[in-house]
Image: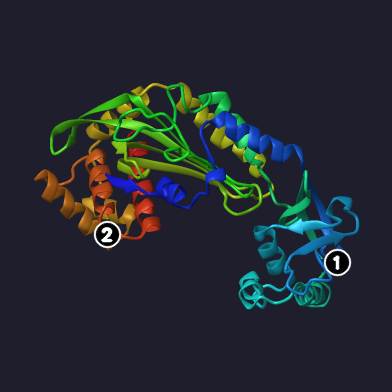
């Protein structure tokens, strides 16, 4: 067992207007953005930057224009899209942070980037996403021509279809230490901005009873999942599924186990892969009982490891990690690893001592994969 910090990091960093108290509220926000957004492929040679104000030397804002795409005319850039256009215009030479930190006037920035767009790289197609609101048009992203955009609104729609509003049903924003709470902006686990979205829902009522969970003692798990996405390319689409003990006030997930993640990059086939791979899993998770999880654990308990133990562990976790996993099980359980469940428990126990979050999650995913070997 270990702790999951993904939601805690969201809780620490999100502004009040990026916190939502129901999935329905988030759905309204994301649908409005999609309805006012247009995506199009244009030539990089047709992109031109200009200062928003030619008269004020302190004005650093830029707008983008382009032929073949009327929506681009006068589009103000967001913080995110400015970084993308800098990477497109001068990869590795003039990153967005350089222009921001040096406080260079907008006319000089536009001249530099326009020159690079025309003379330092070849002509290529570029995918742009623009969004109109009551104040004008924003350029929200600059991606490759084959960028497989999965709109945040589509992801939230799928969640609402399967889990309702996220606050009144079986699957909802988790409580604090297992106790149900009234959802507000301080304790919510529903986050979204114009760049991304993140949702954590849990079923804390229908807990899974596990005999011999820790040192022969009975225990229980709640079920939870994450879903995240960025339609502008900030991150890939992912869904993570896991068991856990409880969530504390600052949204750290304690006693997490069996973490499994599905991650889809925004390549050309991403929208179809989202439909084919992730949504069926969400549907099964929303409708299914705890029986499949319990059965998988029981199967793993009865499935003995036939291979030589050190070879078995090294194949799945690496030669350097195998001895530590074997040793921690003997220390905590007083006997060597014998079954797939023993190996799963030992690997997740070892993961607790790993400081690097990515490495720890990698170990936990590999441990979760062991359960499939018992099927």
Give the image location of residue 130, x and y in percent: 77, 50
Quadrant of the image for the C terminus?
top left
Q: Is residue 7 above or below residue 119?
A: above
Say which label, 1 or 2, has the lower sequence index.
1
Residue positioned 74% across, 69% down in the render: 59
Residue positioned 29% across, 53% down in the render: 351
Give the image location of residue 57, x and y in percent: 77, 75
Q: Is residue 304 above or below residue 126?
A: above
Q: CA distance from mark 1 to mark 2?
A: 52 Å
Q: Is residue 78 above or below residue 284?
A: below
Quadrant of the image for the N terminus?
top left
Find residue 202 and report its image quarter: top left
Q: Is residue 13 left or right of residue 120?
A: left
Q: Which label number is shown at residue 352?
A: none
Q: How many residues crowd around disc 1 within 10 Å: few (fewer than 14), some, or many (20 or more)? A: some
Residue positioned 52% across, 31% down in the render: 22
Q: Which residue is mark 1?
A: 45
Q: How many marks?
A: 2
Report helix, strand or loop for mark 1.
helix
Report helix, strand or loop for mark 2.
loop
Residue positioned 41% across, 29% down in the render: 182
Can residue 306 be seen here?
no
Q: Which label number is shown at residue 321?
A: 2
Q: Nearer the viewer, residue 263 or 53?
A: 53
């Amino acid at each position: 067992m270990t702790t999951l910090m993904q939601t805690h990091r969201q809780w620490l960093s999100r502004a009040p207007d990026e916190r939502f108290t129901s999935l329905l509220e988030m759905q309204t926000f994301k649908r409005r953005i999609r309805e006012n957004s247009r995506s199009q492929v244009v030539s990089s040679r047709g992109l031109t930057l200009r200062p928003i104000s030619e008269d004020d030397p302190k004005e650093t804002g830029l707008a983008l224009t382009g032929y073949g795409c009327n929506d681009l005319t006068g589009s103000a850039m967001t913080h995110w899209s400015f970084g993308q256009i800098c990477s497109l215009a001068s990869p590795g030479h003039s990153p967005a942070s350089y222009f921001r930190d040096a406080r260079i006037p907008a006319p000089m920035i536009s001249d530099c980037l326009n020159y690079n767009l025309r003379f330092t790289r070849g002509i290529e197609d570029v995918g742009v996403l623009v969004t109109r609101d009551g104040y004008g048009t924003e350029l929200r992203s600059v991606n490759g021509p084959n960028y497989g955009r999965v709109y945040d609104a589509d992801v939230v729609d799928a969640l609402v279809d399967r889990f309702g509003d996220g606050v009144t049903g079986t699957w909802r924003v988790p409580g604090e230490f297992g106790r149900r709470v009234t959802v507000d902006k301080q304790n919510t686990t529903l986050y979204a901005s114009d760049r991304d979205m993140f949702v954590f829902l849990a079923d804390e009522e229908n807990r899974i009873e596990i005999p011999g969970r820790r040192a022969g003692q009975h225990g229980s798990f709640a079920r939870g999942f994450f879903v995240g996405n960025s339609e502008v390319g900030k991150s890939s689409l992912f869904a993570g599924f896991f068991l856990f003990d409880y969530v504390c006030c600052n949204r750290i997930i304690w006693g997490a186990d069996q973490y499994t993640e599905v991650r889809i990059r925004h390549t050309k086939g991403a929208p179809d892969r989202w439909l084919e791979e992730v949504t069926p899993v969400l549907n099964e998770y929303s409708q299914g009982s705890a029986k499949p999880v319990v059965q998988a654990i029981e199967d793993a308990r009865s499935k003995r490891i036939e291979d030589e133990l050190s070879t078995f562990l090294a194949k799945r976790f690496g030669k350097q990690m195998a001895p530590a996993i074997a040793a921690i099980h003997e220390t905590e359980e007083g006997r060597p690893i014998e079954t797939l469940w023993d190996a799963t428990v030992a690997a997740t126990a070892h993961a607790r001592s790993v400081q690097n979050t990515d490495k720890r999650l990698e170990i936990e995913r590999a441990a979760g994969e062991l359960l499939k070997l018992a099927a």
